[in-house]
Amino acid sequence: MLTAVSALVLLAAPAEPFLRLRAVGDVMLGTSVPEGKLPPDDGAHLLDAVAPLLADADLTFANLEGPLCDSGTSAKCRKGGNCFAFRTPTSYARYIEAAGIDLASTANNHSGDFGEACRRETEAALDAHHVAWSGPPGSVARLTFKGKKVAMLGFHTSGSCNDVNDLAAAKKLVQSVRGQSDLVIVSFHGGAEGTNATRVKTGAERYLGENRGDLKAFTHGVIDAGADLVIGHGPHVVRGLELYKDRLIAYSLGNFATYGRFDLSGSLGFTVMLEVSLAEDGRFVGGKLFSTKQEGKGVPVPDDTARGAKLVRSLTLADFPKTGVHIDETSFALTP
């Protein structure tokens, strides 16, 4: 028979980790438009320094910031060579697979840079290399892990993708997927951009006149609907970590591997890889931050100075003093 004390100990026992996931923010491995923006050796070694970190997980997630395709034109390309549009060769999908990435969001403001045919090429390239993806309206990435069904939904602040700004539809989609899955991960591309966009605001954020989402309302809403983990990206800088109903929210993971076309000065050039351990019922039970930076034109490498993790810790304390995840100041381990 359990005594009152032993029963209390059992109730207080931490949940056992079931799934250990690592996640990174924006990934764009170089672009063939404009010319001269692809990495050396056709990208073969671009991820070498960070591949061991990416692969050391049960599942690994990344935001694919731009399409994988080999042809087409872009409405973003204007006279005089001004073309801030991305088109990474489809052959680079093999580097994504080789680095250990299992899940990719294609929901962002560059996924449609070269039109719908290019989106389909992207999806076919990811399928061919066993990377599950989500982005277009209604799309769901699905995997099986330890006999459990894992789903990932990618959202962006546009109706061309699962839409951050349509919260009712987002919650309905999450609820539907929850009924068919054991664990549900939500990814979103949203928020203002740049070095001054590290703070999470209450209410809708705007950038260049565009509604970039009410991120607190969105993240809390999808967790209410059944999401177990929410991973953000889009501001190009890191943001803080929040716990809501025992579920982790990462508001932005910054630029991870963005070769040739991104401003990487200051905080735009360093970031974190997030490790999250989830219990079988989806509760957050622990994790860690690994700091990385981009060298040269955008080569990702580990950052021994831990600038990314230090910034995430300070932002978490500032933005979520009561609901933030505890981040150890030396090891950068995460605990509820």
Image: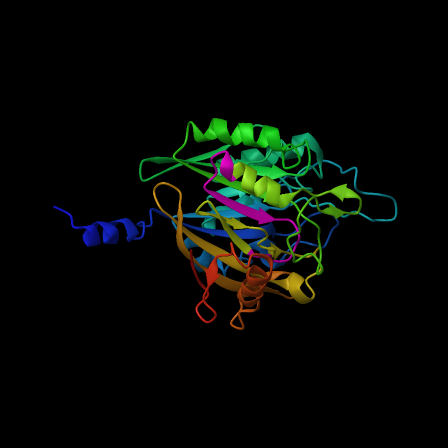
- Percent of width and height locating residue 90: 59, 41
Residue 266 vs residue 231: left or right? right
On screen, residue 197 above or below 309: above
Residue plotted at (63% across, 60% down) = 298
Direction left: furthest residue: 1
Residue plotted at (65% across, 64% down) = 267
- Percent of width and height locating residue 150: 41, 37
Q: Is residue 67 magenta?
A: no
- The C terminus, quarter of image: bottom left
Residue 40 vs residue 241: left or right? right
Direction front: furthest residue: 4
Q: Is residue 231 magenta?
A: yes
> Which quarter of the figure has residue 158?
top right
> Which quarter of the figure has residue 333?
bottom left
Residue 178 vs residue 163: left or right? left
- Percent of width and height locating residue 210: 76, 42
- Percent of width and height locating residue 72: 72, 35
Assign the magenta stretch its main secondary structure: loop
In the foreground, 280 or 75: 280
**Highlighted range, magenta:** 223-240
- Asked if residue 255 can be seen in this view, the reply is yes
In the foreground, 172 or 141: 172
